[in-house]
Amino acid sequence: MTGQMILANRLTDGRVVFLAADGRWVDDIAGGAVATAPGVASQLLATARVAESRNAVIEPCLIDIRQVAGHRQPVAWREAIRATGPTVRTDLPA
């Protein structure tokens, strides 16, 4: 399966989030809505832009995804890194 999802950063904490089908923002890629048709992708992006105008998220964008071994995975390397979390250790003091 291939499709598109909305990815953005939540303004309260900067975390990467995904737009769910019910309009909520979720931390896990598995909970995000997947668009398999261009019209659906445009609708998701419009919903995300409304959330951006309300300062819930910043820079929402459509990303291409694919299904790999039963899990959603961004196609682009940059988005794959963003979707899996920070690349630095967060358990060490600053």
Image (spheres, grey):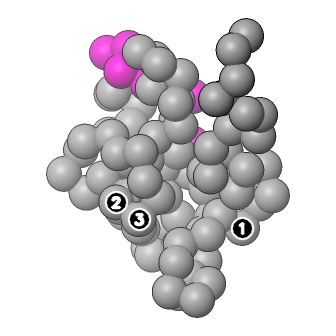
Ranked by sequence position, the earlier of labels 3 and 1 is 3
Check whether the beta carbons of the residues at disc 2 and disc 3 lie within 8 A of each other: yes
Q: Residue furthest front?
A: 92
Residue 34 in view in this figure: yes
Disc 2 designates what residue? 31
10 Å crowding of disc 2: few (<14), some (14-19), many (20+):
some
Disc 1 designates what residue? 75
Q: Position of residue 59 (x, y in %)?
A: 57, 28
Q: Nearer the viewer, residue 38 or 52?
A: 52
Q: Nearer the viewer, residue 91 or 76?
A: 91
Circle 2 — which element?
helix
Circle 3 — which element?
helix
Residue 23's place in the image compared with 93, above or below, is below
For the residues carrying marks 1 and 2, which lies nearer the camera in this image?
2
Q: Residue type at mark 1?
A: Val
Count of marks, rendered view: 3
- Which residues are drawn in magenta? 53-61
- Which residue sits at x=60%, y=77%? 66
- Which residue sits at x=52%, y=30%? 15
Disc 3 designates what residue? 30
Q: Is residue 54 magenta?
A: yes
Q: Nearer the viewer, residue 24 or 91?
A: 91
